[in-house]
Amino acid sequence: MLRIRGWRIGGLFAGLVFCFAAASEGATPRLHVEGNQIKDPAGREVVLRGVALIDLGFLESWHGGAFAMIDRLTDQTDTQGASPGWYPKVLRINITPPDAVDYGWPHPFDPEDDAFYNTLLRPVVDACKSKDLYVIIDWHYVANTWDHVETTSAFWEYMAPRFAEDSHVIFELFNEPINDVHGDWIFNSNDTADWLSVRQDMQTWVDIVRAHAPRNLILVGGAFYSQVIGPAATYPVNDPIGGGNIAYVSHIYPGHWCDSNWSSSYQNQITTCHSAHPVVMTEWGFSDQAGSSTPSDLLMGTITEYGQPLMNFVEGLGISHTAWVASYNWGPPMFWNNWTLRCGEGEMGCFVKDTLYLRREDDQPGLLAGDFTGEGDVNMADLETLAAFWLEDDCLLTAGTDLDGDCAVDLYEFFEMSQNWLR
Ligand SMILES: [Ca+2]
Ligand SMILES: [Ca+2]
Ligand SMILES: [Ca+2]
C-alpha cells in the first residue's frame, strides 16, 4: 500500500519536475535597460536576434498561416544554407492598422472586438513563449505620428494590460514615423525638431503603456522612417514611472548603408543614440532582385556590400535585430513561393538563418538563481517550489530545483533564492 502510494506521489512529483525543467529551459525572463544595454534579471547583457513577420492577419489567412510560419522559423532540422537549423530568439509580429491599407485585410485589429486577440494574437504570443521566443508587438504604421494619435492610443490602451504579465512581450509603439516637420529631408539642423515632434506622440503612448504595463520593454521609432534617432540621446522619451525600460528603433536598408554620400550620417544616428540608450534594429534586409518585387532600389543589396558589414556593425555595438521579412512576396523576401529559402550572395534567407545560428549562444538571457518557475521573478511561486522539494535528494526529482549539482534541495538553494528575492 505504501509502495503504491509512494509510486503515485513519485509520479506526481516527477510530473512537476518535468514542468519546472521545461520552464527553466524556456528562458524568456523580463528584460530591462541599463545605460545603453538591454539586460536580463541577473544583469547579463542580452542581444536578441530574430526575424520580422508580415501583418499577422494577412499571414494567417493569405500567406500560409501564422503557426506554420513560427514552426518554419524554429525548425531545428532545416539544413538549408550553412546551418543545421533555425535559432531565432525573437519574432517581430507586424500588426498593420486597418486604416493603413486601402482595402480590408483579414483579422484586423478592432478595439471594440476581442476576436483578433482571442483567436489569433494571444495564441500566437503563447506559441512563441512555448518555443522560448520573445515577441515584439509592432504597431505597423508608416506615417506621420500626428495623423494617428487616436488609433495608436486605442491600440496600446488595449494591448498593454493584456500583455503586462508576459515577460517575453516587447512593445514597438509605431513602426516608422515620418514627421519631416519642415519638409527639408534629414541630416540638417531641423533633425531635432523632427524628432521632438515624434517624441511628443511617443510620450503619449509610453504614458498609456506604463499605466497598464510597468515592466515590459518599449521600443520607440525615430523620425523619417526610424532613421533619425540621434537626437534621442539628448531628448529621450520619459518613462513616467521611472525605470526607463525604453530602447530606440533604427531601420537600415541597402539604400541607406550603401549610399556613398550619406552612409556615415545614417550610422552616426545610430552611434549617437547608442551612446546613451539601447538601439534595436527591428528591420534590415536586402535582395539583389528587390526591384522585381518593389518599385524602389532601397532594398537592392548583397551580403558583401550590405548584409555582412551591417551585421558586423550592429553586433559590434550589441544591437538586437530582426530581419525583414519572412515572406515570398513582401520585400525584401527571405523565401521563394514554395517556402524554400532564397540563398546566395544576393539573397537574405540563408544569410539570416546562418547568422542566427552562428550567434545562437551569444548574449542570451538566463534565469536568476532561485527562479525555479522560469518567469524572471523570484517570489512566492518559487518559494512554494522550493518547499515542495525541501530536503529531497533524489536527482530525478530535484533536477529543476537543485542549483549546485548535489541533488539535494536544502539551505544552499534557500540562500541562493533569498539573494534574489523579489528581484
Ligand atoms: Ca527634416
Ligand atoms: Ca519565478
Ligand atoms: Ca543542492
Image (cartoon, rainbow, N blue to C red):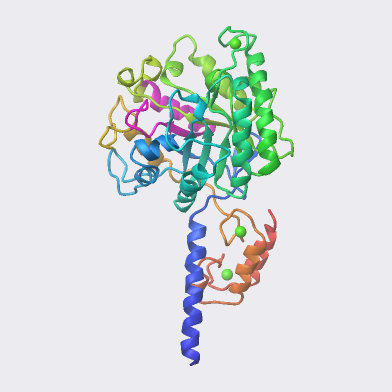
Percent coordinates x, y for residue 204 in the rendering: 68, 29
**Residues in magenta, as a range:** 305-334
* Quarter of the rendering containing residue 404: bottom right
- Front residue of this view, candidates 55 and 377: 55
Residue lying at the far right in this picture: please name it. 241
Q: Is residue 278 magenta?
A: no
Ligand 2 position by quadrant: bottom right
Identify whether 180 is placed above or below 105.
above
Identify whether 415 is placed above or below 287.
below
Relative side of 59 to 382, left or right = left
Relative side of 229 to 307, left or right = right
- Front residue of this view, candidates 228 and 407: 228
Residue lying at the far front in this picture: please name it. 112
Relative side of 35 to 308, left or right = right
Number of numbered tags placed on the structure image? 0
Q: What residue lies at 41% left-to-right and 19% top-to-bottom? A: 254
* Quarter of the rendering containing residue 244: top right
Q: What residue lies at 66% left-to-right and 15% top-to-bottom? A: 192
Q: What residue lies at 63% left-to-right and 26% top-to-bottom? A: 149
- Front residue of this view, candidates 59 and 229: 59
Percent coordinates x, y for residue 255 in the rendering: 42, 16
Residue 52 visible at all: no
- Front residue of this view, candidates 105 and 179: 105
Q: Is residue 312 magenta?
A: yes
Residue 219 visible at all: yes
Identify whether 244 is placed above or below 99.
below
